[in-house]
Image (cartoon, rainbow, N blue to C red):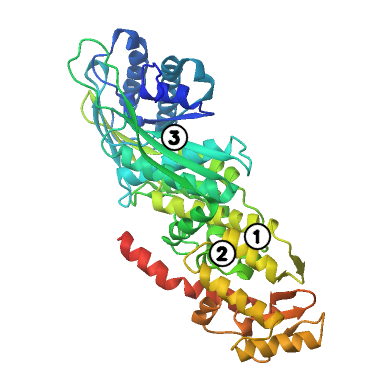
Amino acid sequence: MVEEKGRTSLACLAKALEADIIVVLVPETLLCPGERPREEHAMRYEELGKCVRGLLRLAENGCREDREAWEAYRRALERLRGIMSELCREWLGDVSERIEVAVVPAIGEYAGPKGVRVLWRLGPSKIDPVTTYAAYSMMTAVAAISALNVETSERLRMILDTTHGINYMPLAAYRALMAASRLISAALNVTVEFEQYNSAPYPRGVPQPPVLDIYMVRNEVITPTKAAQRLVYSYLIRDAGKAEPFHRMRDCLPTTHAELNSLRKKFNECIELHSKAEVLAAAIHFSMPLALLQFSSEFERPELSRLARGIRSILDNLMSYVKMKGDGRDKLVVTHLALPHYDDLKSLLAAASLVEYGINALEASKVTKSDDRIEADLSTLKQVVGEWLSGPLQRVAEHELACFENAFKTGEIPAKDLLSLIERAKKSPGEWVNVDGKCEDQDRIMVAHAGLALRAIEVRAQEELYIRYREECLDGVKKLLRGALKPLRQLLMIRAT
């Protein structure tokens, strides 16, 4: 047990655990922090009150859905971020230089100074408070961690403090940070220790601030291989290339649609990557070592950290696209016109993380590339399975490689087709030999043989046995891998609905 003093649970945790960076999630509804401020916060309340009254004046004469309204709302959110940053520095004291405040979407009706009230709504029909709060929380966490320049050999510790969360926020933050942990672990090849803390309940009516215990309520160690397997499911929750960066209200003005269309184009790189990552998802899920190496070699490293920081900036911009309507002299209704869905963003980022994971595996393996095809020996493929493909079919891959090894070294296996192929290779050392005839066309056979179906590969015998895909079969292998994922995707879709 560690004893620390502080005004908040976050302050105590920051001191006890020596955080490198502290991210504070602030709902936009704090623009209306209440009618009666504490004396020490009076000036800050007045500043926020001016922001809200300015927005109300802008919307007095009807609905506003235009650039002037969006710029005004953006400035209000920036001022809220600034004020909360000041408060955090006061509360957290000597760790203030490591604080980042993120304003996230929220819903509800709240009161501000001088009787002003604001009602926040989510406009897009496919968006709910949990999904959009989780989406912003996940992006904020991934972008913040990416900025730390974590080394591969390090163990990263991610701490979630849900003491001050209300309603849906603790659940959404937990989901988001677990996803962020997996994304970072797989992409950067680091082990992440996830811990969640919460203080004892705050007793009402006590004359002095009470001393509260802070408890760890959940913890988990996330390894890169474990993360990659889970990210396959995250990726498959949306069809390849069909993840939407954000959803919008259907009845937006034409000028709003034009603005949002321009914003969506900034996601083109992510969407293209999402459309191509399906083969890697299959290779990882079905523990196919040669497929993982081959198809990872066809990608350039997407750099999850760069993508995350870019998306975070776009989402901050997206929050300002609102429709404001005055409802009487003292009430403002703010409706968000476009917001992200957690599952879509998680699927997009999972694609980038899985590609980075595959490239990490490729760079850690001793392989050669000739005519755009990866050539790997049995020892390398066994190492890939052991270190990078510890999924549900790992034992299938190990058995398949053992069959190749026994056929090459002893010639004592019951699989006559495999034995015949390797004997032919031994008679022509240094030359590539394959099974005559058409390429493999059954996805179940590809899965059963860990991507090493005889009609899809060719082998070369030297001191070691080398394997690569037949050039004319590469496109067919990709098609089979995509097809093999369909039952799993359908199952995930059913569970999601």
Residue 445 position within the rendered picture, expressed as x and y whole percent measured from the top left: 52, 82
Residue at 53% in and 35% down? 144
Residues tagged 2 and 1 counted as in contact (Cβ below 8 A): yes
Q: Residue beneath label 3, please?
A: 159
Residue at 25% in and 20% down? 34
- Looking at this view, name the residue that lies furthest to the left: 205
Residue 256 position within the rendered picture, expressed as x and y whole percent measured from the top left: 42, 44
Tag in front: 1 or 3? 3
What amino acid is found at the position of numbered circle 2 in the picture? Leu
Tag in front: 2 or 1? 2
For marks 3 and 2, the one nearer the N-term is 3
Q: Is residue 497 above or below residue 204?
A: below
What amino acid is found at the position of numbered circle 1 in the picture? Phe
Quadrant position of the N terminus in the picture? top left
Q: Nearer the viewer, residue 98 or 242?
A: 98
Residue 65 position within the rendered picture, expressed as x and y whole percent measured from the top left: 37, 38
Q: Nearer the viewer, residue 58 or 79?
A: 79
Q: Residue beneath label 1, please?
A: 299
Which mark is on residue 98?
A: none
Residue at 51% in and 48% down? 183
Q: Residue beneath label 2, please?
A: 280
